[in-house]
Image: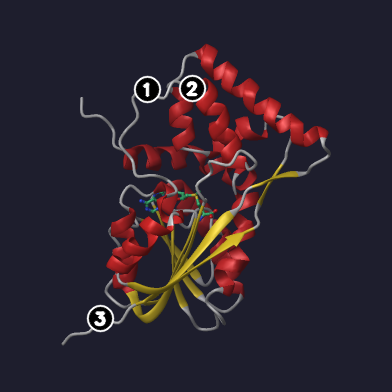
Amino acid sequence: MIPKTFAQYEQEGWQRNAATYDVIDLPTTRQAVTPILDSLGSLQGLHILELASGTGYLAKQAVAQGATVTGLDISPKMVKIAQKRVSVGASFLVGDASDLPFEAERFDAVVCSFGFPHFAYPQKVLKESARVLKSDGILTFTVWPESELDNNFFGLIQKVCQIYADPEVDLPPAPSSSALANPTIREPMMTQAGFKDIYTQTLDLRWPLQGPETMVEFIVKGSVRTRMLYERQTPAVQAQIRAGLVTETMAYIRDGKKSIPCPGMLVIGSKAVVRMD
Ligand SMILES: C[S@@+](CC[C@H](N)C(=O)[O-])C[C@H]1O[C@@H](n2cnc3c(N)ncnc32)[C@H](O)[C@@H]1O
């Protein structure tokens, strides 16, 4: 049997997560929508391509500000939810961000909210984004910073998994989820793909606490990569991971906190004009 690729697991994972996405993940990711849209200036009359458009929340805000949006997502269930959310001013299609079904120089801007950590071929997505942008068009996307710090949502999850999980389980080869947060990787990748004037900003996002099981719920209903690691553990180790996550979450709840810091990173680049001489 041919083993499944990371891209296949991602597609299946988001199909599974689609129904609960707006309850588990969106309360955090939607906090990045205003900074992403603000990076484009006035949206009036812009045609925006949104990659990994999820359940269509960003598209709805962009349309309300005068833009037309084309959303593309690998999960048909996500696309269906987005179509229901925004029926005028936006259209959504199922597709792979690394192989865009659009002619060159079609869009004024390309945006992508937390899609890059899930792409099997991020370099191809950057190249495709540059191809479909008009000259001087803008690409804006968000990623999660490298979370080796243990004082944020993903850092705490990573810490608990590092303590209890067996890392030697069989996982498909995949690019680092935070590669584009690292300037030594991001700058050459974006420059080679055809972007200039690369600018980044840290976003002060927070993961709302919905009870002691907040992190556990995220792993089993709102993540793909972490769930792959979790599901490959023995039942005993899974129980240890869940208990560890509840302990970390309870520390915030006992302190009267309503959320856990979950900083995001905004990345903006302009399409570089290619000289033909
Ligand atoms: C974390 S969600 C982000 C959704 C939304 N942009 C947001 O910020 O709430 C990741 C999304 O990426 C989509 N996705 C994963 N791989 C993709 C690919 N190769 N091409 C297009 N979309 C992809 C998933 O289906 C999912 O909707």
- Residue 94 location, quadrant: bottom left
In the rendered structure, find residue 254 and report the number of the disc placed on it.
none
C-alpha span from label 2 to label 3:
47 Å
251 w.r.t. 57: above or below? above
Q: Amino acid at mark 2?
A: Ala
Residue bearing the label numbered 3: 274
User: At 61% across and 38% down in the image, what residue appears?
Assistant: 150
Instruction: Please state, as top left, top right, bottom left or bottom right, where the N terminus lies in the image.
Output: top left
What is the x, y in percent for residue 16? 48, 37
In the rendered image, the residue lying farthest to the bottom is: 277
128 w.r.t. 44: above or below? above
Label 1 vs 3, first from the N-terminus:
1
User: At 45% across and 72% down in the image, what residue appears?
Assistant: 48
What is the x, y in percent for residue 70? 43, 67
50 w.r.t. 7: above or below? below
Along the horizontal axis of the image, is 174 left or right of 204? Answer: left
Residue bearing the label numbered 1: 169
Q: Amino acid at mark 3?
A: Val
What is the x, y in percent for residue 218? 59, 36
- Secondary-structure class at tag 2: loop
What is the x, y in percent for residue 166? 44, 20
